[in-house]
Image (cartoon, rainbow, N blue to C red):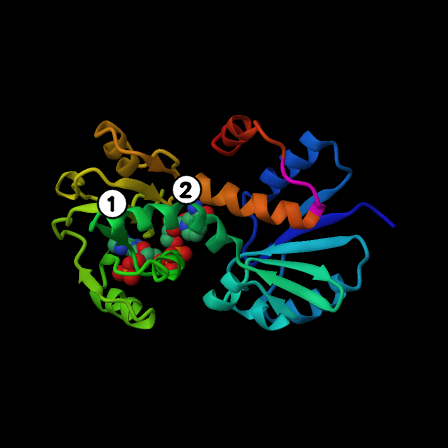
Amino acid sequence: MGTPYAEVIGDPVEHSKSPLIHRFWLEKLGIEGDYRATRVAPDALGDFLRARASDPDWRGCNITIPHKEAALSWAASLSPAAAEAGAVNTLVPVSGGLAGFNFDVDALAADVLPKAQEAASMEQAVIVIGAGGAARAVLQILRNVPTLDIAILNRNRARAETLLHDFALAGAALPLDARLPPAGLVVNASSLGMTGYPPLEIDLSPAGRPTVYDLVYAPIETDLLRQARQRGLATFDGLTMLIGQARLAFERFFRLPPPQGTEPELRELLTR
Ligand code: NAP
């Protein structure tokens, strides 16, 4: 037996922060193990996973663009979040094949679900900005909250309407410059505010005192979060979900939870 290892697979994959996170925890825990980034072309996914599944040192992989949906068909079993999302972000070898998980959804749910439940109980809306893949994960969580009022703001309003329809949710599909309704939670699941994209120009004041979650993690301190903090609102930044999903995957790969109390150091490493 060689050194146990896990990895992130994608195409491209060089941008992934997962190796930094997992190696940081491996080192902190003194585990002899490795975590790599491996470029896998779409047509090579099946052969790749077959070969890895027969490698006794392989502990599994995280999956990034463009394999999240395709990898689903290689899983012998699926977690509820992966089955519901129709996408996996982690595969782990188990007896009988590969187990598929969607820890992106699980990590997001840990923070979004309680805030959305609170909003519903106070008859406040949840506002989602964006209608792409990340917004889909948010709606997957929101659909578990009965009687929730949802507003999706998106450049392409038809896409927001499709999203509401796909999740059988009643809600409003609004343009990006719509006045915000009173809300308990605002989630930016669009690319706006991300390095290389236009800024997210939004006025939080009509929303009242919502918790603000920005999924953008480059930069960490977005204009949206800055505005929220200036208003004294509770916030979550994009690293929360990134680190949260990595935590869940690490525990599956290496059979130990990541070390406690090291998050400030990890965050510093990720923003360097
Ligand atoms: P996606 O599927 O490509 O969707 C992009 C969204 O941004 C769409 O709603 C799109 O609007 C909007 N958008 C893009 N460019 C725009 C522009 N120039 N003007 C107005 N709207 C624009 O991307 P995604 O996978 O959902 O990712 C969205 C963001 O979430 C990214 O910043 C990503 O890094 C972040 N994210 C973070 C995590 C994490 O762990 N923190 C995980 C996943 C994603 P249209 O529908 O009108 O095109």
N-term mark: 1 or 2:
1
Query: Mark 1 sits on what residue?
Result: 184
Quarter residue 269 falls in: top right
Tell me the SS state at disc 2. Answer: helix
Q: Is mark 2 within 8 Å of ligand 1?
A: yes
- Considering every residue shown, the one lying at the far right of the view is 1
Residue 255 is inside the magenta segment: yes
Identify the amino acid type marked 2: Gly
- Considering every residue shown, the one lying at the far front of the view is 121
Query: Mark 2 sits on what residue?
Result: 238
Q: Position of residue 260 (x, y in %)?
A: 59, 30
Residue 270 is inside the magenta segment: no
Q: Residue at x 24, y 68 (%)?
A: 161
- 197 vs 85, left or right, is left
Q: Residue at x 39, y 61 (%)?
A: 140
Q: Residue at x 67, y 47 (%)?
A: 36
Q: Position of residue 177 (x, y in %)?
A: 14, 51
**Above or below for 86 versus 196:** below
Q: Which residues are magenta?
A: 254-258
Q: Position of residue 2 (x, y in %)?
A: 85, 48
Identify the amino acid type marked 1: Gly
Q: Position of residue 84 (x, y in %)?
A: 47, 67
- 115 vs 249, left or right, is left
